[in-house]
Amino acid sequence: MSASDVTFAGSIPAIYEQYLVPLVFAPYAQDMAARVRGDAPRRILETAAGTGAVTRALAAALPEAEIVATDLNQAMLDRASTTIPAGRVRWQQADAQALPFEDGAFDTLVCQFGAMFFPDKVAAYREALRVLRSGGRFRFSVWDTLAANPASKVVHDAVGAFFPDDPPRFFERAPFGYCDHDRIRDDLRQAGFEAVDIETVEKVTQAPSPREIAIGLCQGTPLRGEIEPRAADRLAEVTDRTAAALADHFGPSAFENRMSALVVTARA
């Protein structure tokens, strides 16, 4: 894991929110909120909240719950805070590996597509267990394999082909690099969780165009931090080549974006 893998700054938060949240994250956010609603929690902590896709879904599903949403990147929280009425959610910059909260302070801890980025996952899971009350639930999602997420696979291959001598490995290393069920269970058990359930959840969205996916994934994720150092001033060209590869694979217009993720539930 490199420093650039966890850096969501500059124009990335706005692009992420515009292109990736509706296409990729919103369907899983609704799924997560429905699961959490079944827990009937009074206090919810969210880590790696990003631009607030899950936060918004939780706020709508659980209007009486207290929600504390955190992220390592203040720029993402700044963007998220503009999408929810002031006072509905408490926003706080925090590292999931060293949470600034008291023991047993929350009923549920939620993390959507953030655990893959934790440098020390066991440490982050120990912190989750620490801040949960006895019997509380830690619910998080991670992406399934890159092969099970075909649009992302096409983007990964296209960007790699642009840099054949030094292909970016961000997708393999971070978002799609933590999908082994046994490893996830072992990490959680090392942290002290005993009851662990892992479910594969597939979703389908309608991608408006190949270009929108190319912009979202090339310019709205830390993949950008691997493209720009390799080819200064060629980000637009890489994005265009990636859009062409997506069009070759899926067609030039709107297409079905099929996704697969793992939803994990661990009980304190």
Image (cartoon, grey):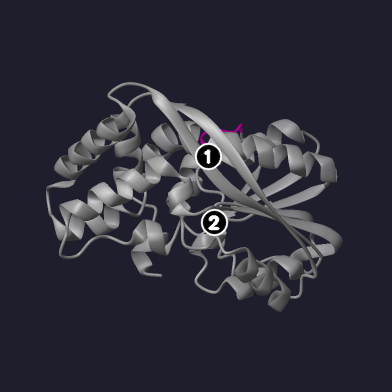
Residue at left 16%, top 59%? 164
Please tell me how crowded label 2 is: few (under 14), some (14-19), or many (20+) other residues with Cα within 10 Å.
many
Q: Nearer the viewer, residue 92 or 157?
A: 157
Residue found at the very far bottom of the displayed protein: 190
Do tag 1 and tag 2 residues touch (Cβ < 8 Å)? no
Q: Nearer the viewer, residue 229 or 67?
A: 229
Residue at left 79%, top 61%? 105
User: What residue would you read off at disc 1?
Assistant: 25
Q: Give the x, y percent position of residue 240.
A: 19, 36
Label tally:
2
Q: Residue 14 is drawn in which quadrant?
A: top left
The answer to whether residue 99 is left or right of residue 130 is left
Amino acid found under the numbered disc labelled 1: Phe
- Asked if residue 38 is among those painted magenta in the image, a careful observer would answer no
- Asked if residue 84 is among those painted magenta in the image, a careful observer would answer yes
Q: Give the x, y percent position of residue 159.
A: 24, 50
Give the overall secondary structure of the magenta segment.
loop
Q: Give the x, y percent position of residue 245.
A: 24, 38
Residue found at the very far top of the displayed protein: 253
The answer to whether residue 189 is left or right of residue 134 is left
Which is more N-terminal, label 2 or label 1? Answer: 1
Amino acid found under the numbered disc labelled 2: Gly
Q: Residue 142 is drawn in which quadrant?
A: bottom right
**Distance Cα–Cα, label 1 vs label 2:** 12 Å
Q: Give the x, y percent position of residue 161.
A: 19, 52
Mark 2 residue element: loop
Point out the stretch of residues depicted in magenta. Answer: 81-85
Residue at left 43%, top 61%? 174
Number of the label disc, if any, that sits on residue 114: 2
Mark 1 residue element: helix
